[in-house]
């Protein structure tokens, strides 16, 4: 089949497909002869296409129609101008939020166990919050900034950006990370840094004493060296944790069930499990004497009560009541003795 026959065959196959293509796609190609093409399209479509389209244009229109009929997509440059699209400013804000969200999500997952969310991810959380603020608020007085907020936050039912922002905020609140940070959430508070330092020192003490006692660790599981050498470090860490709890309760009297940040709580839980369950260590209570004294006093209260009631009650004297017959016989005997 020659080139002319091939072109004629393509033209004969193209006509039914072109009838399904929107008229908008043919406007750039038929711009020069719109009136002539409109009149001739009804009478002789083959002749109009043969006169107005060159062979290269005919092939391009055929490929375009095949793409549409097969469910293909047009490129961004071929989209109609009335379809919704993001301007460069909005797209940049969306990409910034996407990158920050990806970094924060990775940090949260990596810091899940052991829990290190607050101390590791707080810079990324602040970054995501700032990106969300940039989207929410109107930057300047232009209408484009308002359209960015509407396009990214309220344009559809799902509102993915809003859902992600609420997820990060709820996670941060459940972890009570604000309790570990300063007022402006720019860095860790002094008490948190001091607690984490003592926590690392306590774990280092455990590790060093376990390395020195590796033989007994594998056989007899004797952790006496750990209990003996690390008792002071453990007591200091536990005392600091109790003080932080008391301070937190005083600062949040109105809120019930307040906790320290999850990093501090998880660190103390790990230390207590190692100390009591793994090493089977114990710390003698310093309040033993007052507790024993109060217990003894409570036990002796009933004894003191009954003894005092017995001593202070009136004691009735016993009186001997003699029978009348015995009394008369006794007096008669006395009279006889006196007469003799």
Image (spheres, rainbow, N blue to C red):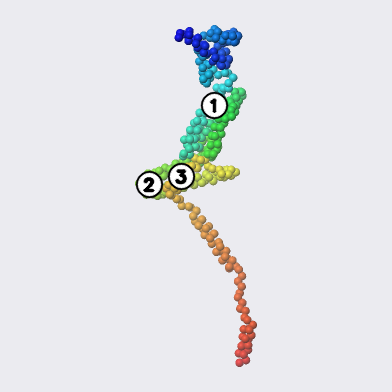
Q: Is residue 34 visible?
A: no
Look at mark 1 in the image and give the residue it sits on: 94
Percent position (x, y) of residue 224?
40, 49
Identify which residue, 162 or 272, lies in the foreground: 162
Quadrant housing residue 52 = top right
Q: Element under label 1?
A: helix
Q: Describe residue 213's horizontal placement relative to residue 316 as left or right.
A: left
Look at mark 3 in the image and give the residue it sits on: 271
Quadrant housing residue 21 = top right
Percent position (x, y) of residue 299?
53, 60
For the residues labelled 2 and 1, the Cα–Cα distance comes to: 55 Å
- The N terminus lies in quadrant: top left
Toward the left, the furthest residue is 215
Query: Residue drawn at (48%, 33%), measured in percent from left and top?
Result: 106
Look at mark 2 in the image and give the residue it sits on: 217
Query: Residue drawn at (52%, 13%), measured in percent from left and top?
Result: 14
Between disc 2 and disc 3, whose residue precedes?
2
Identify which residue, 340 or 196, lies in the foreground: 340
Identify which residue, 83 or 304, lies in the foreground: 83
Position above or below: 214 against 154: below
For the residues labelled 2 and 3, the Cα–Cα distance comes to: 18 Å
Q: Element under label 3?
A: helix
């Amino acid at each position: 089949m020659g080139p002319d026959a091939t072109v004629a065959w393509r033209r004969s196959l193209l006509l039914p497909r072109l009838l399904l293509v929107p008229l908008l796609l043919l406007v750039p190609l038929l711009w020069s002869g719109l009136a002539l093409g409109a009149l001739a399209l009804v009478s002789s479509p083959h002749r109009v296409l043969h006169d107005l389209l060159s062979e290269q244009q005919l092939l391009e229109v055929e490929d375009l129609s095949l793409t549409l009929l097969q469910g293909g997509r047009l490129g961004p440059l071929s989209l109609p101008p009335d379809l919704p699209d993001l301007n460069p400013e909005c797209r940049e804000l969306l990409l910034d939020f996407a990158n920050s969200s990806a970094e924060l999500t990775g940090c949260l997952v990596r810091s899940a166990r052991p829990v290190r969310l607050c101390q590791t991810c707080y810079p990324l959380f602040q970054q995501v919050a700032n990106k969300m603020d940039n989207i929410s608020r109107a930057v300047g007085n232009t209408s484009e900034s308002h359209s960015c907020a509407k396009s990214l936050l309220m344009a559809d039912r799902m509102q993915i950006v809003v859902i992600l922002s609420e997820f990060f905020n709820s996670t941060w609140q459940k972890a009570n990370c604000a309790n570990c940070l300063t007022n402006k959430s720019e860095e860790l508070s002094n008490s948190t840094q001091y607690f984490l330092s003592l926590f690392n020192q306590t774990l280092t003490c455990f590790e060093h004493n376990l390395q020195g006692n590796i033989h007994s660790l594998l056989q007899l599981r004797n952790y006496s060296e750990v209990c003996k050498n690390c008792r002071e470090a453990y007591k200091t860490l536990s005392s600091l944790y109790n003080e932080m709890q008391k301070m937190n309760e005083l600062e949040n009297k109105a809120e019930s069930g307040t906790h320290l940040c999850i990093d501090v709580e998880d660190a103390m839980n790990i230390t207590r499990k190692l100390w009591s369950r793994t090493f089977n260590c114990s710390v003698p209570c310093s309040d033993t004497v007052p507790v024993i004294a109060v217990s003894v006093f409570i036990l002796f209260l009933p004894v003191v009560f009954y003894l005092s009631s017995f001593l202070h009650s009136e004691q009735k004297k016993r009186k001997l009541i003699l029978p009348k017959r015995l009394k008369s016989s006794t007096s008669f005997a006395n009279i006889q003795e006196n007469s003799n």
